[in-house]
Amino acid sequence: MKQMFVSALVVAFAGGAGLYLTAGDAPGGGTAPGPVDGTVDGTVDGAGGAGSVTPETVPETRLSYTDDRGACSGEELVSEDERVTYVQACDGVAGWRWFAEASEHGETSRFSDRDDPETAGQYGGYLGNFGDFHTVIEWRVIDGAPYAAIQRYVSATFETGEPVRQETLIVTALRPGGSPTSCHVGYVDATAVSGANEIARDMADRLAAEHDCGSGSVWVVDAASPSIDQALADGSTRPAN
């Protein structure tokens, strides 16, 4: 049902090519290590530079799939003004869950380490409308504890009259037991920069642990600031959704 609200318009102009990640794909389009039959473990290189991840604490990549193979449940809600929202809850890793709400204007999501996410979701991406999330979530994990998640969000803008596709990797900080339990750290404009996968992982490993969820802003890596270091130097931020 969610497809009726958001995906159909994106598929129409994108031709469906590369819209969703297949099993084994990473959020930036590359191939993730390890098996492809659900939640997996895979070791990747740690990010360099300052931040929460050091050579002694190399993170793991774990993937979960938000499809219809038993990991998700959903329901359709109709408001008094007949607006329809599709609400979805998916099991993640280590007790974490992913919650999403899809409507005609796009999709919001949040993560929680309990059944009740408590706080409202954040919109995906930052350009245009009619977007939704890919079916794969990449979790960044140290010693069995997830501290960040990465997703791809595909949206469209119609400012020029013709639909223009925008792909954004969204890095989310996870706060077990906190309020909120998750918040966006930053966005990587995968349409404009190369190596978006590794940039998103670098952002997660360097910035997620210390990101202030109450700051009201997120970091942005785009054509003007095409790396984490450049974004930090430029103060490349935007208001959080």
Image (cartoon, rainbow, N blue to C red):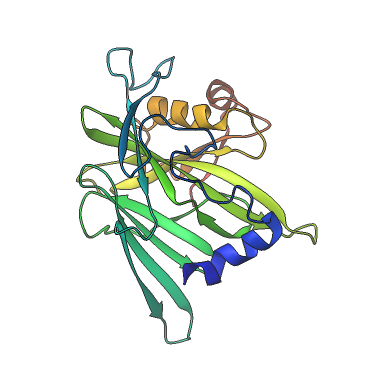
Q: Nearer the viewer, residue 90 or 211?
A: 90
> Where is residue 123 shown, x and y percent of the image?
48, 55
Please say whether residue 173 is visible from this viewpoint. yes
Name the residue furthest top. Answer: 55
Q: Quadrant of residue 75?
A: bottom left
The percent position of residue 237, horizontal first and vertical second, equals: 55, 37
Q: Note whether residue 104 is visible.
A: no
Q: Quadrant of residue 231?
A: top right
* Direction from residue 203 to residue 234 in the image, left or right: right
Residue at point 38%, 40% (across, down): 36
Residue at the spot x=33%, y=22% of the render?
52
Residue farthest to the right, as pictured: 161
- Residue 156: % across, % down: 65, 56
- The x and y percentages for residue 28 are 53, 37
Residue 13 lies, with reference to residue 192, above or below; the image says: below
Is 224 situated above or below 55? Answer: below
Q: Give the residue at x 60% y 54%.
A: 155
Number of numbered markers: 0
- Residue sitting at 54 percent across and 70 percent down? 5
Q: Is residue 135 above or below residue 26?
A: below
